[in-house]
Image: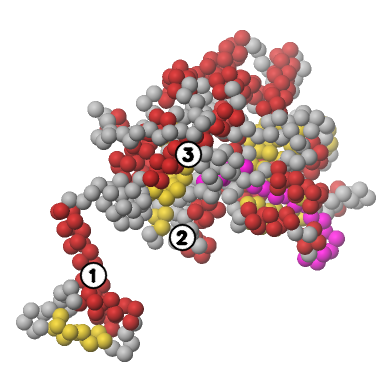
Amino acid sequence: MSPSFRSLSFKRRKAPKLNPGYNPNIEKLRIKEYPQLKEQTYLDHSGTTLYAESLLTSISADLRENLYGNPHSQNPSSKLSAAKVTAVRLQVLSLFKADPAKYDVVFCANTTAGVKLVADAFAGHEREDNDKKEEEKKRKKFKYRYHKDCHTSLIGPRGLADSAECFSGDEEVEAWLDSPEEEEQEGEEEEGDEETLGLFAWPGQSNFSGRRLPIQAWSSKLREKRGRKYYSLFDAAALVMTSPLDLSDADASPDFIVCSFYKMFGYPDLGALIVRRESSEVLQHRKYFGGGTVGQLMASMDHIKRWYAKDPHEHLEDGTCAFHSIIALGHAMDTHKRLYDSFERISAHTAALAAAMASMLGDLTHRSTGRKLAEIYTEGKFGDPKQQGPVITFNLRDSRGEPISYLAVEEAAGARNIHIRSGGHCNPGGVQHYCRIPQAEMKAMFDDGKMCGDERDVINGRHIGALRASLGAMSTLEDVLTFVDFVREEYVSKPLSLEEKRRLLLQERKKDVEEVKRVMKKYGTVLSSSRTGKTLLCFWTDSVNLDEALPINNRLATTTVSVS
């Protein structure tokens, strides 16, 4: 039998009682719709969820039966593509309960591309000096603030900003939002009459720990306190994988929302920037322009007039949009609704599974020492979708409390066809916070050559990343049990035999001997037997460190050493 499919050699623990919300019908659905999951345990839905077989069938049939042309033309096939793209835009807004009169959808490659669109526009923003020539206008200063739980792609805009600040937690965000506007302007007067433009970014769900953050509470307060001087950028990518997003109250919702549809539906590989129309003017200042976004352009002369129509996507989607992928997205939303009904049901289903997995992992202890095996990282409450997504991020420690390589765990899981993820998860703030790595120590690691994705996962006795198991709409209780069984079999230490206890005792005694030798050589004058070499007496010098020496006096009563 292949090692990947070897049977578990222990008795499986009784299945836990699940919270209400678990959908047992998914177990049958998987057999028909997800044949790629046969003999696989997939727990990396935060990376991407999986596409259903019926989705591929419907997309294939549509592309076989219809002639789709480039939507930038006016022929029949082009008009058909344009109509389908428009319909899917409206379908996306409906999914998020967003009024088309107040929001627009800009299709892009992924979440990162949407973030970059916003950042480029803010970096290129200029003052409204209507009496000056274009080349004489001054650029507005771009000030960027972001939460420490941000994904790398959401930290990236600071490279384009004139100044940036990272908030270390929710409390710092709240304090800033509650501070008087005058404090925000303090120090800026020194810059003369230079205007500033601010952007505050945060995720709806940490892609490291799965903890969920406020949405409308922060965006509405930002709008109320800062007015048009600050805008909000909300990363919904991890959140909407298993949770509904309600943008029905445009006055309280963020200005710009980014997401990736492959995280929601498995296919297509497409993202979106959802723009609040009232805030869209600020995005009209990108320096780059692509096909389809300009109304006037001369090749040999610096003359250009961009499209600034009522729909922001007309000047933000450079070149031909990914119309085949957008058409596929329409099928993906239809298929997903048919299979799972709503994201509310998916949220309840995955929350029940995550609570069970977290509980079972947290209960695992080494039988030899009684130490906990898993350290789970989050500040949210499992089972409560308002606080925590279906993500369990953790590390393992052996029976002595020493860190177990997360890269080795991922590799061992892969040998069992269990798909999890390890590393820093493109979330440096989460790594530092949950692995308790001080700023100076993290910088020292980088100075020593530590790079993202390399093979060093434990440095100075400390994990510098973690394991992540994430659940999705098609996850089942069997996935949870299979994974927990694997962890228990591979990493929970068993009660020690007499021989093992003797071996460990000798190892500890050897450590004691070495420590005695080190301290005695450092501080003491040793009187030894000339015949046997055994220590008879140790005289301490005046420079002795009592914190080191006193324990040695106690050890000498039970430990015999030879000092050369």
Disc 3 is placed on an element classified as helix
Give the number of the disc on residue 445.
2
- The amino acid marked with disc number 3 is Ala
Disc 2 is placed on an element classified as helix
Relative to 123, residue 1 above or below:
above
Q: Which is closer to the viewer, label 2 or label 3?
A: 3
**Residue density around tag 1, few if under 14, some if 14–19, many if 20 or more, within 10 Å:** some
**Residue density around tag 2, few if under 14, some if 14–19, many if 20 or more, within 10 Å:** some
Read off the residue under disc 1. 512
Which numbered disc flags the more N-terminal residue, 3 or 1? Answer: 3
Q: Is residue 124 visible?
A: no
Rendered residue at 20%/77% (across/down) = 556
Rendered residue at 26%/36% (across/down) = 10
Q: Which is closer to the viewer, label 3 or label 1?
A: 3
Q: Closest to the observer: 54 or 491? A: 491
The answer to the question of whether label 1 and label 2 lie on touching residues, with beta carbons closer than 8 A, is no
Rendered residue at 52%/39% (across/down) = 383
| Magenta region includes residue 451 | no
Rendered residue at 43%/39% (across/down) = 357
Read off the residue under disc 3. 355
Q: Which residues are magenta?
A: 187-211
